[in-house]
Image (cartoon, rainbow, N blue to C red):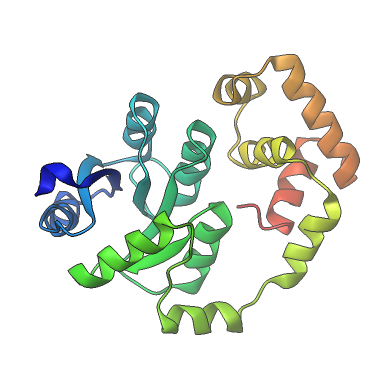
Amino acid sequence: MSSTLKPLGILLVHSHEIMRGGLRAMLESDETIFRYVVDEADSGRAAITQARARHFAIAIIGYDLPDMKGTEAIIELRLINPHTRYLFLSGTNEAAHVRAMARAGALGHISTNISTRQLLGAIRSVYQNNTYYSADIVRQLEEGCEAPASNALAEAGLTRRELEILMLVAQEKTNEEMAAILFISRRTVDTHRQNLMHKLKVKNTAGLLKAAYQLKIV
């Protein structure tokens, strides 16, 4: 039966092999809707390398990776393939981390002690471009609502490309690195940076960094 199911590529990004193995076993034991094709990465860079080689429908990512934060990994992975959906995996329900991952692009949060049924439900939800959060996490997010930052971001009027550049500035990428990541010229990066400084009313890179944190880009 598994050969007739639609294949769904999943990338598991976590520093602990046992955690990745447990999630893989859960996914590969299911043969109801999808045939899960699972790959693993133990770091952000390893995930980026895999994403450049093939497309994944969904990536499940931890917050503290050996070489970068999960937020940074999601931002870079989204630049490689904007169609991949992301789930944040953590052993705690720390709302600040959930918010940070959501700002980076995660559609939901799952805990490390998740059941097979919950895992499959989360994957199906984000695959359909819906969110997936436990009731407890939803309450925490509502209590710590960050509407002022969201409003400020909307008022800044940044284009998608300008937002990408600002995210990369916050990651301390050089103009050359930004050009390589976004597949644009160094001159185009310079132009976007100038436009950003004008819109955000800042004069230099330090000002852009401050604006990125004030707008909660990272």
| Residue 114 is at least partly visible in this image | no
Residue 46 spot, x, y in % from top left: 31, 33
Q: Is residue 104 left or right of residue 55?
A: right
| Residue 153 is at least partly visible in this image | yes
Name the residue nearer the viewer: 125 or 210. 125
Residue 140 spot, x, y in % from top left: 52, 81
> Which residue: 71% across, 40% down?
160
Toward which corner of the image does residue 199 lie, by quadrant?
top right
Q: Is residue 184 left or right of residue 75?
A: right
Q: Is residue 118 above or below residue 100?
A: below
Residue 145 spot, x, y in % from top left: 65, 76
Name the residue nearer the viewer: 15 or 133. 133
> Which residue: 21% across, 47% down?
36
> Which residue: 9% across, 49% down?
1
Name the residue nearer the viewer: 39 or 210. 39
Residue 211 spot, x, y in % from top left: 76, 50
Name the residue nearer the viewer: 26 or 103. 26
Toward which corner of the image does residue 178 lie, by quadrant?
top right
Toward which corner of the image does residue 55 lie, by quadrant?
top left
Q: Is residue 36 above or below residue 198?
A: below
Count of numbered tags: 0
Q: Is residue 65 above or below residue 172?
A: below
Q: Is residue 166 left or right of residue 90?
A: right
> Which residue: 26% across, 64% down?
120
